[in-house]
Image (cartoon, helix red, strand yellow):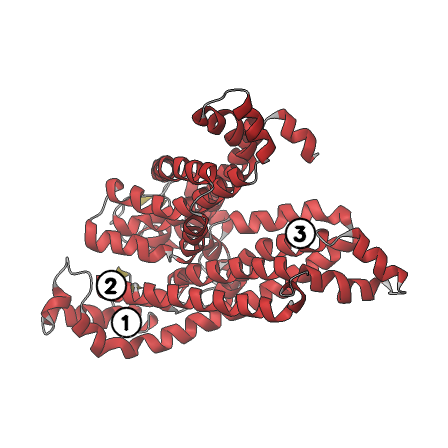
Amino acid sequence: MNPLPLASFDGAIEFIFVPQSSNVTGGNKVGGFEKSLELLLKHLEVTALALAIALVIALPLGLYLGHRGKGELFAVGIGNAGRAIPELAVIALVAVLIGVGLKTVAPALAILGIAPILVNTFVGVRQVDPASVEAARGMGMSELDIIRKVELPLAVPTVMGGVRGAAIVIVATATIAPLAGVETLGDFILNRNVYGENGLLAGAILVALLALALEGLLALLQRRLTSDGLKVKTA
Amino acid sequence: MTSAALLAAAGDVGGDFFRERESGTLPCQADETHLFCFDWAKENIDRYGTPTVQHLEIVLLSVVIGFVVAFALALLAHRRRSLQPPLLAATGVLYTIPSIAFFFLLLPVTGFGRDTAIIVLAAYTLQIIYRNTILGLANVPDSVKDAARGMGFTNRQILWKVELPLAIPEIIAGLRVAVVSTIAIATLVVFINAGGLGTQMYGSGNLTFPTSIVIAAAIVMAMALVSDLVLVTVQRLSTPWRRVRPA
Protein backbone atom coordinates (compact mmCIF):
# COMPACT_ATOMS: atom_id res chain seq x y z
CA MET A 1 0.00 0.00 0.00
CA ASN A 2 1.23 3.47 -0.79
CA PRO A 3 -1.05 6.12 0.71
CA LEU A 4 -1.48 9.30 -1.27
CA PRO A 5 0.78 11.71 0.60
CA LEU A 6 -0.52 14.98 -0.78
CA ALA A 7 -4.19 14.46 -0.08
CA SER A 8 -5.58 15.29 3.32
CA PHE A 9 -9.15 15.56 4.53
CA ASP A 10 -8.47 19.08 5.87
CA GLY A 11 -7.14 20.13 2.49
CA ALA A 12 -10.12 18.56 0.73
CA ILE A 13 -12.64 20.37 2.94
CA GLU A 14 -10.82 23.64 2.30
CA PHE A 15 -10.86 22.91 -1.44
CA ILE A 16 -14.66 22.61 -1.35
CA PHE A 17 -15.10 26.10 0.09
CA VAL A 18 -12.10 28.18 -0.96
CA PRO A 19 -10.52 28.17 -4.45
CA GLN A 20 -6.99 26.76 -4.44
CA SER A 21 -4.07 27.47 -6.71
CA SER A 22 -3.31 24.82 -9.28
CA ASN A 23 -0.09 24.08 -11.13
CA VAL A 24 -1.84 23.43 -14.45
CA THR A 25 -4.17 26.34 -15.03
CA GLY A 26 -1.45 28.99 -15.10
CA GLY A 27 -2.26 30.80 -11.90
CA ASN A 28 -6.04 30.45 -12.17
CA LYS A 29 -7.51 29.12 -8.96
CA VAL A 30 -9.51 25.89 -9.04
CA GLY A 31 -12.24 24.46 -6.84
CA GLY A 32 -14.00 26.56 -4.27
CA PHE A 33 -17.60 26.82 -3.22
CA GLU A 34 -19.00 28.18 -6.47
CA LYS A 35 -17.44 25.44 -8.60
CA SER A 36 -18.45 22.75 -6.11
CA LEU A 37 -22.03 24.00 -6.13
CA GLU A 38 -22.10 24.16 -9.92
CA LEU A 39 -20.90 20.56 -10.24
CA LEU A 40 -23.23 19.42 -7.46
CA LEU A 41 -26.24 20.94 -9.21
CA LYS A 42 -25.23 19.32 -12.51
CA HIS A 43 -24.85 15.99 -10.74
CA LEU A 44 -28.32 16.39 -9.25
CA GLU A 45 -29.80 17.47 -12.57
CA VAL A 46 -28.54 14.46 -14.53
CA THR A 47 -29.48 12.11 -11.67
CA ALA A 48 -33.02 13.50 -11.40
CA LEU A 49 -33.50 13.42 -15.15
CA ALA A 50 -32.28 9.83 -15.44
CA LEU A 51 -34.38 8.70 -12.49
CA ALA A 52 -37.45 10.38 -14.02
CA ILE A 53 -36.91 8.65 -17.37
CA ALA A 54 -36.42 5.29 -15.64
CA LEU A 55 -39.61 5.81 -13.60
CA VAL A 56 -41.70 6.80 -16.62
CA ILE A 57 -40.67 3.62 -18.42
CA ALA A 58 -40.40 1.06 -15.63
CA LEU A 59 -43.24 2.01 -13.28
CA PRO A 60 -46.19 1.70 -15.72
CA LEU A 61 -44.67 -1.44 -17.26
CA GLY A 62 -44.15 -3.03 -13.84
CA LEU A 63 -47.68 -2.08 -12.72
CA TYR A 64 -49.21 -3.46 -15.90
CA LEU A 65 -47.27 -6.75 -15.86
CA GLY A 66 -47.85 -7.18 -12.13
CA HIS A 67 -51.56 -6.46 -12.45
CA ARG A 68 -52.02 -8.90 -15.31
CA GLY A 69 -49.73 -11.40 -13.59
CA LYS A 70 -47.86 -11.80 -16.84
CA GLY A 71 -44.25 -11.68 -17.87
CA GLU A 72 -42.67 -12.84 -14.62
CA LEU A 73 -39.74 -14.31 -16.54
CA PHE A 74 -39.35 -11.04 -18.45
CA ALA A 75 -39.46 -8.77 -15.40
CA VAL A 76 -37.21 -10.90 -13.23
CA GLY A 77 -34.88 -11.59 -16.16
CA ILE A 78 -34.50 -7.86 -16.83
CA GLY A 79 -33.85 -7.32 -13.12
CA ASN A 80 -31.08 -9.91 -13.02
CA ALA A 81 -29.49 -8.93 -16.32
CA GLY A 82 -29.65 -5.25 -15.35
CA ARG A 83 -27.47 -5.89 -12.36
CA ALA A 84 -24.77 -7.40 -14.58
CA ILE A 85 -24.47 -4.36 -16.88
CA PRO A 86 -21.09 -2.72 -16.24
CA GLU A 87 -21.78 0.98 -15.56
CA LEU A 88 -18.49 2.05 -17.10
CA ALA A 89 -19.38 0.32 -20.39
CA VAL A 90 -22.71 2.14 -20.62
CA ILE A 91 -21.12 5.57 -20.21
CA ALA A 92 -18.17 4.65 -22.44
CA LEU A 93 -20.29 3.31 -25.29
CA VAL A 94 -22.62 6.29 -25.21
CA ALA A 95 -19.69 8.67 -25.27
CA VAL A 96 -17.82 7.00 -28.14
CA LEU A 97 -20.82 5.97 -30.24
CA ILE A 98 -23.76 8.29 -29.74
CA GLY A 99 -22.25 11.48 -28.47
CA VAL A 100 -21.62 13.50 -25.34
CA GLY A 101 -23.86 15.74 -23.29
CA LEU A 102 -26.86 15.67 -21.00
CA LYS A 103 -29.21 14.46 -23.76
CA THR A 104 -27.30 11.22 -24.26
CA VAL A 105 -26.01 10.64 -20.72
CA ALA A 106 -29.37 10.94 -18.93
CA PRO A 107 -31.08 8.20 -21.01
CA ALA A 108 -27.97 6.04 -20.65
CA LEU A 109 -28.08 6.36 -16.86
CA ALA A 110 -31.83 5.68 -16.99
CA ILE A 111 -31.07 2.24 -18.50
CA LEU A 112 -29.32 1.34 -15.25
CA GLY A 113 -32.34 2.45 -13.19
CA ILE A 114 -35.01 0.62 -15.17
CA ALA A 115 -34.16 -2.89 -13.94
CA PRO A 116 -34.50 -2.31 -10.17
CA ILE A 117 -37.71 -0.26 -10.52
CA LEU A 118 -39.31 -2.71 -12.94
CA VAL A 119 -38.60 -5.85 -10.93
CA ASN A 120 -39.59 -4.29 -7.59
CA THR A 121 -42.82 -2.84 -8.96
CA PHE A 122 -43.70 -6.19 -10.49
CA VAL A 123 -42.96 -8.09 -7.29
CA GLY A 124 -44.72 -5.47 -5.14
CA VAL A 125 -47.93 -5.66 -7.15
CA ARG A 126 -47.83 -9.46 -7.30
CA GLN A 127 -47.54 -9.61 -3.52
CA VAL A 128 -50.80 -7.71 -3.03
CA ASP A 129 -53.38 -9.97 -1.42
CA PRO A 130 -55.69 -11.21 -4.23
CA ALA A 131 -58.61 -10.85 -1.78
CA SER A 132 -58.08 -7.09 -1.67
CA VAL A 133 -58.13 -6.93 -5.46
CA GLU A 134 -61.28 -9.09 -5.61
CA ALA A 135 -62.95 -6.88 -3.02
CA ALA A 136 -62.13 -3.79 -5.07
CA ARG A 137 -63.45 -5.45 -8.21
CA GLY A 138 -66.62 -6.43 -6.34
CA MET A 139 -67.11 -2.79 -5.35
CA GLY A 140 -67.20 -1.96 -9.04
CA MET A 141 -63.74 -0.41 -9.42
CA SER A 142 -62.33 -0.34 -12.94
CA GLU A 143 -59.06 -2.17 -13.58
CA LEU A 144 -57.23 1.16 -13.78
CA ASP A 145 -58.71 2.22 -10.44
CA ILE A 146 -57.64 -1.09 -8.92
CA ILE A 147 -54.07 -0.45 -10.01
CA ARG A 148 -54.12 3.18 -8.86
CA LYS A 149 -56.06 2.92 -5.62
CA VAL A 150 -55.39 -0.60 -4.38
CA GLU A 151 -52.30 -2.25 -5.86
CA LEU A 152 -49.98 0.75 -6.11
CA PRO A 153 -50.57 2.01 -2.54
CA LEU A 154 -50.11 -1.48 -1.13
CA ALA A 155 -46.93 -1.97 -3.17
CA VAL A 156 -45.37 1.38 -2.17
CA PRO A 157 -42.68 0.00 0.19
CA THR A 158 -41.44 -2.49 -2.40
CA VAL A 159 -41.68 -0.02 -5.30
CA MET A 160 -39.75 2.58 -3.29
CA GLY A 161 -37.12 -0.04 -2.53
CA GLY A 162 -36.61 -0.29 -6.28
CA VAL A 163 -36.55 3.48 -6.72
CA ARG A 164 -33.90 3.78 -4.01
CA GLY A 165 -31.84 1.05 -5.65
CA ALA A 166 -32.11 2.88 -8.97
CA ALA A 167 -31.17 6.20 -7.36
CA ILE A 168 -28.06 4.66 -5.79
CA VAL A 169 -26.77 3.23 -9.06
CA ILE A 170 -27.64 6.37 -11.04
CA VAL A 171 -26.05 8.85 -8.63
CA ALA A 172 -22.97 6.62 -8.45
CA THR A 173 -22.64 6.28 -12.20
CA ALA A 174 -23.23 10.01 -12.72
CA THR A 175 -19.81 10.36 -11.12
CA ILE A 176 -18.16 9.10 -14.31
CA ALA A 177 -20.45 11.22 -16.53
CA PRO A 178 -17.59 13.72 -17.19
CA LEU A 179 -16.18 10.97 -19.48
CA ALA A 180 -19.23 11.72 -21.65
CA GLY A 181 -19.05 15.46 -21.37
CA VAL A 182 -21.40 16.14 -18.45
CA GLU A 183 -19.54 18.00 -15.71
CA THR A 184 -20.72 16.38 -12.51
CA LEU A 185 -18.85 16.12 -9.21
CA GLY A 186 -16.85 13.38 -10.88
CA ASP A 187 -14.96 16.15 -12.67
CA PHE A 188 -12.97 16.75 -9.47
CA ILE A 189 -12.12 13.05 -9.40
CA LEU A 190 -11.35 12.41 -13.07
CA ASN A 191 -9.36 15.59 -13.73
CA ARG A 192 -6.83 15.07 -11.03
CA ASN A 193 -4.12 16.91 -12.99
CA VAL A 194 -6.24 20.08 -12.86
CA TYR A 195 -7.73 19.90 -9.38
CA GLY A 196 -4.91 18.14 -7.56
CA GLU A 197 -5.05 15.49 -4.86
CA ASN A 198 -7.20 17.57 -2.55
CA GLY A 199 -9.71 18.14 -5.33
CA LEU A 200 -9.86 14.40 -5.91
CA LEU A 201 -10.63 13.76 -2.26
CA ALA A 202 -13.10 16.67 -2.19
CA GLY A 203 -14.98 15.14 -5.12
CA ALA A 204 -15.14 11.78 -3.35
CA ILE A 205 -16.45 13.40 -0.16
CA LEU A 206 -19.11 15.38 -2.02
CA VAL A 207 -20.28 12.36 -4.05
CA ALA A 208 -20.53 10.23 -0.91
CA LEU A 209 -22.48 12.92 0.96
CA LEU A 210 -24.79 13.49 -2.02
CA ALA A 211 -25.56 9.77 -2.30
CA LEU A 212 -26.26 9.47 1.43
CA ALA A 213 -28.46 12.59 1.39
CA LEU A 214 -30.43 11.33 -1.60
CA GLU A 215 -30.92 7.94 0.05
CA GLY A 216 -32.11 9.64 3.25
CA LEU A 217 -34.51 11.83 1.32
CA LEU A 218 -36.00 8.85 -0.53
CA ALA A 219 -36.34 6.93 2.75
CA LEU A 220 -38.32 9.88 4.14
CA LEU A 221 -40.41 10.03 0.98
CA GLN A 222 -41.12 6.33 1.33
CA ARG A 223 -42.45 6.89 4.87
CA ARG A 224 -44.68 9.70 3.64
CA LEU A 225 -46.04 7.68 0.72
CA THR A 226 -46.68 4.51 2.71
CA SER A 227 -50.25 4.47 3.94
CA ASP A 228 -50.69 4.49 7.72
CA GLY A 229 -52.49 1.16 7.60
CA LEU A 230 -49.36 -0.54 6.26
CA LYS A 231 -47.11 1.04 8.89
CA VAL A 232 -49.20 -0.37 11.73
CA LYS A 233 -48.81 -3.85 10.31
CA THR A 234 -45.02 -3.68 10.00
CA ALA A 235 -44.46 -2.06 13.41
CA MET B 1 -0.86 10.63 -24.24
CA THR B 2 0.89 12.94 -21.87
CA SER B 3 3.60 10.79 -20.42
CA ALA B 4 5.08 7.37 -20.82
CA ALA B 5 4.82 6.88 -17.08
CA LEU B 6 1.06 7.29 -17.21
CA LEU B 7 0.80 4.72 -19.97
CA ALA B 8 2.97 2.31 -18.07
CA ALA B 9 0.86 2.76 -14.95
CA ALA B 10 -2.24 1.69 -16.82
CA GLY B 11 -0.54 -1.38 -18.26
CA ASP B 12 0.09 0.34 -21.58
CA VAL B 13 -3.36 -0.66 -22.77
CA GLY B 14 -4.64 2.70 -23.88
CA GLY B 15 -1.41 3.56 -25.60
CA ASP B 16 -1.62 0.54 -27.84
CA PHE B 17 -5.19 1.20 -28.79
CA PHE B 18 -4.57 4.68 -29.97
CA ARG B 19 -1.42 3.86 -31.84
CA GLU B 20 -3.21 1.18 -33.83
CA ARG B 21 -6.17 3.43 -34.39
CA GLU B 22 -4.04 6.23 -35.77
CA SER B 23 -1.91 3.98 -37.95
CA GLY B 24 -5.01 3.01 -39.93
CA THR B 25 -3.83 -0.54 -40.49
CA LEU B 26 -7.25 -1.82 -39.51
CA PRO B 27 -9.78 0.43 -41.20
CA CYS B 28 -12.97 -0.89 -39.60
CA GLN B 29 -11.63 -0.36 -36.12
CA ALA B 30 -10.60 3.20 -36.91
CA ASP B 31 -14.13 4.07 -37.99
CA GLU B 32 -15.56 6.05 -35.07
CA THR B 33 -19.14 4.93 -35.57
CA HIS B 34 -18.28 1.27 -35.92
CA LEU B 35 -19.89 -0.76 -33.15
CA PHE B 36 -17.92 -3.94 -33.56
CA CYS B 37 -14.88 -4.85 -35.62
CA PHE B 38 -14.47 -8.61 -35.99
CA ASP B 39 -11.03 -8.37 -37.64
CA TRP B 40 -9.64 -6.49 -34.69
CA ALA B 41 -11.40 -8.76 -32.19
CA LYS B 42 -9.95 -11.89 -33.81
CA GLU B 43 -6.41 -10.58 -33.70
CA ASN B 44 -6.55 -9.05 -30.24
CA ILE B 45 -8.66 -11.38 -28.16
CA ASP B 46 -5.50 -12.49 -26.28
CA ARG B 47 -5.14 -9.17 -24.57
CA TYR B 48 -8.32 -9.80 -22.56
CA GLY B 49 -6.83 -12.81 -20.76
CA THR B 50 -4.87 -11.02 -18.06
CA PRO B 51 -7.54 -8.39 -17.29
CA THR B 52 -10.15 -11.16 -17.05
CA VAL B 53 -8.05 -13.07 -14.54
CA GLN B 54 -7.38 -9.86 -12.55
CA HIS B 55 -11.09 -9.08 -12.60
CA LEU B 56 -11.98 -12.55 -11.31
CA GLU B 57 -9.38 -12.39 -8.57
CA ILE B 58 -10.61 -9.03 -7.32
CA VAL B 59 -14.24 -10.16 -7.33
CA LEU B 60 -13.48 -13.49 -5.64
CA LEU B 61 -11.37 -11.96 -2.88
CA SER B 62 -13.90 -9.18 -2.29
CA VAL B 63 -16.89 -11.49 -2.09
CA VAL B 64 -15.12 -14.05 0.11
CA ILE B 65 -14.01 -11.34 2.56
CA GLY B 66 -17.43 -9.67 2.39
CA PHE B 67 -19.14 -13.00 3.01
CA VAL B 68 -17.01 -13.93 6.01
CA VAL B 69 -17.55 -10.54 7.67
CA ALA B 70 -21.26 -10.28 6.83
CA PHE B 71 -21.91 -13.86 7.89
CA ALA B 72 -20.16 -13.30 11.23
CA LEU B 73 -22.12 -10.09 11.77
CA ALA B 74 -25.37 -11.88 10.93
CA LEU B 75 -24.66 -14.69 13.42
CA LEU B 76 -23.84 -12.10 16.07
CA ALA B 77 -26.99 -10.13 15.36
CA HIS B 78 -29.03 -13.33 15.30
CA ARG B 79 -28.00 -14.00 18.87
CA ARG B 80 -28.31 -10.39 20.03
CA ARG B 81 -31.37 -8.93 18.38
CA SER B 82 -30.58 -5.43 19.66
CA LEU B 83 -27.62 -5.29 17.26
CA GLN B 84 -29.78 -5.75 14.18
CA PRO B 85 -30.92 -2.15 13.55
CA PRO B 86 -27.49 -0.53 14.02
CA LEU B 87 -25.76 -3.16 11.87
CA LEU B 88 -28.37 -2.76 9.15
CA ALA B 89 -27.83 1.01 9.20
CA ALA B 90 -24.03 0.74 9.19
CA THR B 91 -23.90 -1.72 6.30
CA GLY B 92 -26.53 0.42 4.55
CA VAL B 93 -24.20 3.43 4.63
CA LEU B 94 -21.36 1.35 3.15
CA TYR B 95 -23.75 0.10 0.46
CA THR B 96 -25.02 3.59 -0.40
CA ILE B 97 -21.67 5.34 -0.79
CA PRO B 98 -20.81 5.05 -4.50
CA SER B 99 -17.85 2.70 -4.96
CA ILE B 100 -15.95 5.20 -7.04
CA ALA B 101 -16.16 7.81 -4.27
CA PHE B 102 -15.28 5.19 -1.69
CA PHE B 103 -12.09 4.25 -3.61
CA PHE B 104 -10.84 7.81 -3.40
CA LEU B 105 -11.96 8.35 0.19
CA LEU B 106 -9.57 5.55 1.10
CA LEU B 107 -6.67 6.96 -0.93
CA PRO B 108 -5.05 8.86 1.97
CA VAL B 109 -5.16 5.62 3.96
CA THR B 110 -4.50 2.73 1.59
CA GLY B 111 -3.42 4.44 -1.64
CA PHE B 112 -3.86 3.21 -5.20
CA GLY B 113 -4.10 -0.42 -6.10
CA ARG B 114 -5.82 -3.69 -5.45
CA ASP B 115 -6.02 -3.49 -1.65
CA THR B 116 -8.24 -0.42 -1.82
CA ALA B 117 -10.37 -2.01 -4.52
CA ILE B 118 -10.95 -5.16 -2.49
CA ILE B 119 -11.76 -3.28 0.72
CA VAL B 120 -14.37 -1.13 -1.05
CA LEU B 121 -16.00 -3.96 -2.98
CA ALA B 122 -16.09 -6.18 0.12
CA ALA B 123 -17.72 -3.35 2.08
CA TYR B 124 -20.28 -2.98 -0.69
CA THR B 125 -21.35 -6.65 -0.46
CA LEU B 126 -21.82 -6.60 3.34
CA GLN B 127 -25.38 -5.26 3.37
CA ILE B 128 -26.68 -7.65 0.71
CA ILE B 129 -25.23 -10.76 2.36
CA TYR B 130 -25.95 -9.64 5.92
CA ARG B 131 -29.58 -8.78 5.23
CA ASN B 132 -30.29 -12.02 3.41
CA THR B 133 -28.64 -14.16 6.08
CA ILE B 134 -30.71 -12.48 8.81
CA LEU B 135 -33.83 -12.92 6.69
CA GLY B 136 -33.08 -16.59 6.08
CA LEU B 137 -32.53 -17.27 9.78
CA ALA B 138 -35.72 -15.40 10.68
CA ASN B 139 -37.73 -17.45 8.19
CA VAL B 140 -36.98 -20.75 9.95
CA PRO B 141 -40.27 -21.85 11.54
CA ASP B 142 -40.33 -21.93 15.35
CA SER B 143 -41.88 -25.38 15.26
CA VAL B 144 -38.78 -26.78 13.57
CA LYS B 145 -36.52 -25.25 16.21
CA ASP B 146 -38.78 -26.57 18.96
CA ALA B 147 -38.64 -30.05 17.47
CA ALA B 148 -34.83 -29.89 17.41
CA ARG B 149 -34.76 -28.71 21.00
CA GLY B 150 -37.10 -31.55 21.93
CA MET B 151 -34.66 -33.99 20.35
CA GLY B 152 -31.99 -32.69 22.71
CA PHE B 153 -30.10 -30.35 20.34
CA THR B 154 -28.03 -27.65 21.99
CA ASN B 155 -28.40 -24.04 20.80
CA ARG B 156 -25.21 -24.37 18.80
CA GLN B 157 -26.42 -27.56 17.14
CA ILE B 158 -29.74 -25.92 16.33
CA LEU B 159 -27.92 -23.04 14.64
CA TRP B 160 -25.51 -25.12 12.56
CA LYS B 161 -27.64 -28.19 11.86
CA VAL B 162 -31.13 -26.74 11.59
CA GLU B 163 -31.30 -22.98 11.16
CA LEU B 164 -28.37 -22.38 8.80
CA PRO B 165 -29.15 -25.26 6.42
CA LEU B 166 -32.76 -24.05 6.19
CA ALA B 167 -31.51 -20.51 5.53
CA ILE B 168 -29.29 -21.60 2.61
CA PRO B 169 -31.72 -20.47 -0.13
CA GLU B 170 -31.85 -16.90 1.22
CA ILE B 171 -28.12 -16.80 1.93
CA ILE B 172 -27.29 -17.93 -1.61
CA ALA B 173 -29.85 -15.53 -3.07
CA GLY B 174 -27.89 -12.75 -1.32
CA LEU B 175 -24.60 -14.12 -2.58
CA ARG B 176 -25.92 -14.18 -6.14
CA VAL B 177 -26.87 -10.49 -6.00
CA ALA B 178 -23.55 -9.63 -4.34
CA VAL B 179 -21.45 -11.56 -6.87
CA VAL B 180 -23.25 -10.30 -9.97
CA SER B 181 -23.19 -6.64 -8.90
CA THR B 182 -19.58 -6.86 -7.76
CA ILE B 183 -18.53 -8.28 -11.13
CA ALA B 184 -20.17 -5.27 -12.83
CA ILE B 185 -18.83 -2.68 -10.40
CA ALA B 186 -15.31 -4.11 -10.47
CA THR B 187 -14.88 -2.50 -13.91
CA LEU B 188 -14.52 0.79 -11.98
CA VAL B 189 -11.33 -0.30 -10.19
CA VAL B 190 -9.45 0.88 -13.29
CA PHE B 191 -9.72 4.37 -11.79
CA ILE B 192 -7.43 3.39 -8.91
CA ASN B 193 -5.04 1.44 -11.14
CA ALA B 194 -6.19 -1.93 -9.85
CA GLY B 195 -6.51 -3.52 -13.30
CA GLY B 196 -9.43 -5.68 -14.34
CA LEU B 197 -11.62 -5.50 -17.43
CA GLY B 198 -12.22 -1.79 -16.92
CA THR B 199 -8.72 -1.24 -18.36
CA GLN B 200 -10.07 -2.35 -21.74
CA MET B 201 -12.81 0.30 -21.61
CA TYR B 202 -10.83 3.17 -20.15
CA GLY B 203 -7.06 3.23 -20.47
CA SER B 204 -4.44 5.91 -19.87
CA GLY B 205 -7.04 8.54 -19.08
CA ASN B 206 -9.06 7.95 -22.24
CA LEU B 207 -12.02 5.87 -23.26
CA THR B 208 -10.96 3.15 -25.68
CA PHE B 209 -13.11 2.44 -28.72
CA PRO B 210 -16.43 0.59 -29.31
CA THR B 211 -15.07 -2.85 -30.20
CA SER B 212 -12.91 -3.06 -27.10
CA ILE B 213 -15.64 -1.73 -24.82
CA VAL B 214 -18.14 -4.23 -26.24
CA ILE B 215 -15.75 -7.18 -25.81
CA ALA B 216 -14.89 -6.20 -22.24
CA ALA B 217 -18.56 -5.65 -21.36
CA ALA B 218 -19.48 -9.00 -22.92
CA ILE B 219 -16.82 -10.78 -20.83
CA VAL B 220 -18.10 -9.02 -17.70
CA MET B 221 -21.70 -10.03 -18.36
CA ALA B 222 -20.74 -13.59 -19.29
CA MET B 223 -18.74 -13.83 -16.07
CA ALA B 224 -21.79 -12.62 -14.14
CA LEU B 225 -24.07 -15.13 -15.87
CA VAL B 226 -21.73 -18.07 -15.29
CA SER B 227 -21.19 -17.17 -11.62
CA ASP B 228 -24.94 -16.90 -11.17
CA LEU B 229 -25.47 -20.34 -12.69
CA VAL B 230 -22.73 -21.82 -10.50
CA LEU B 231 -24.37 -20.41 -7.37
CA VAL B 232 -27.82 -21.67 -8.40
CA THR B 233 -26.29 -25.11 -8.87
CA VAL B 234 -24.59 -24.93 -5.47
CA GLN B 235 -27.92 -24.03 -3.91
CA ARG B 236 -29.68 -26.97 -5.59
CA LEU B 237 -26.98 -29.41 -4.49
CA SER B 238 -26.81 -28.12 -0.92
CA THR B 239 -30.56 -28.24 -0.31
CA PRO B 240 -31.59 -31.69 -1.57
CA TRP B 241 -34.74 -31.67 0.62
CA ARG B 242 -36.19 -28.85 -1.47
CA ARG B 243 -36.20 -31.08 -4.54
CA VAL B 244 -38.31 -33.74 -2.90
CA ARG B 245 -41.94 -33.17 -3.80
CA PRO B 246 -44.26 -33.81 -0.88
CA ALA B 247 -46.50 -36.71 -1.86
Residue B42 makes an appearance in the image: yes
Instruction: Please say if the residues under marks 1 and 2 sit with CB atoms less than 8 Å apart.
Output: yes
Work out whether residue A169 or residue B208 is closer to the camera in this orientation and state it. A169
Looking at the image, tell me whether mark 3 or mark 1 is earlier in sequence order: 1
Residue that mark 1 sits on: B13
Residue B135, disc: 3
Q: How many marks?
A: 3
Q: What residue is disc 2 on?
A: B208
| Chain under numbered label 1 | B
Q: Say few, some or many: other residues with alpha carbon within 10 Å of mark 1 (under 14 / 14 to 19 / 20 or more).
A: some
The amino acid type found where label 3 is placed reads: Leu
Point out the image quarter for the N terminus of chain B: bottom left
Residue B240 on image: x %, y %: 65, 69
Question: What amino acid type should be assigned to the residue bearing mark 1?
Answer: Val
Return the chain for callout 3: B
Q: Secondary structure at mark 3?
A: helix
